[in-house]
């Protein structure tokens, strides 16, 4: 299973230019999740593509405040870790301007 997920990442890395910020809507996140479906989410794939090109950057998960937003960010972080991103490279933070979306971004480490 990990081999197929790694292969999916390699395909994603080979495509196009990446943006430094992506939005992941609550509606998109509400669909059933698996390793393959997480990788297929463009916001996640784009963020991972960017991080693979710049592994010295941090992945910042900016989530809506409150318990629901925090749980959403924690689950997304867990998925990213299970797909091979080091936990130390992922930083959830409260403060998304949208209650219905998480913003994924890449930031240079301080």
Image (spheres, rainbow, N blue to C red):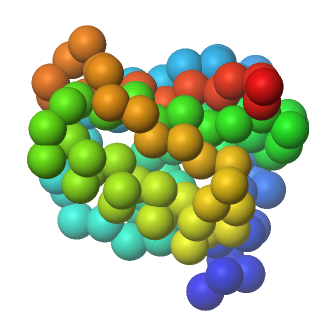
Image height check: is 71 above or below 52? Answer: below
Q: Nearer the viewer, residue 68 or 4?
A: 68
Quadrant into which the C terminus falls: top right
> In terms of image quadrants, where is residue 3?
bottom right
Q: What residue appears at the point 64 percent right and 19 percent down from the top-left corner?
A: 20
Q: Nearer the viewer, residue 59 or 30?
A: 59
Tell me: 22 left or right of 20: left
Quadrant into which the N terminus falls: bottom right
> In terms of image quadrants, where is residue 95?
top left
Q: Position of residue 45 (x, y in %)?
A: 58, 44
Q: Position of residue 72 (x, y in %)?
A: 26, 50
Q: What residue appears at the point 66 percent right and 82 percent down from the top-left corner?
A: 2
Q: Position of residue 12 (x, y in %)?
A: 70, 46
Q: Nearer the viewer, residue 95 or 44?
A: 95
Tell me: 27 left or right of 3: left
Tell me: 94 left or right of 49: left
> In terms of image quadrants, where is residue 83?
bottom right
Image height check: is 99 above or below 26? Answer: above
């Amino acid at each position: 299973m990990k081999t197929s997920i790694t292969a999916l990442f390699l395909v994603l890395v080979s495509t196009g230019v990446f943006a430094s910020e992506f939005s992941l809507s609550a509606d998109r996140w509400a669909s059933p999740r698996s390793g393959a479906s997480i990788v297929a989410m463009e916001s996640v794939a784009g963020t991972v593509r960017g991080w693979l090109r710049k592994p010295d950057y941090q992945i910042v998960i900016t989530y809506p405040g409150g318990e629901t937003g925090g749980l959403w960010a924690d689950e997304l972080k867990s998925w990213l870790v299970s797909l091979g991103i080091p936990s130390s490279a992922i930083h959830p933070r409260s403060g998304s301007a949208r209650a219905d979306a998480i913003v994924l971004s890449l930031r240079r480490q301080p």
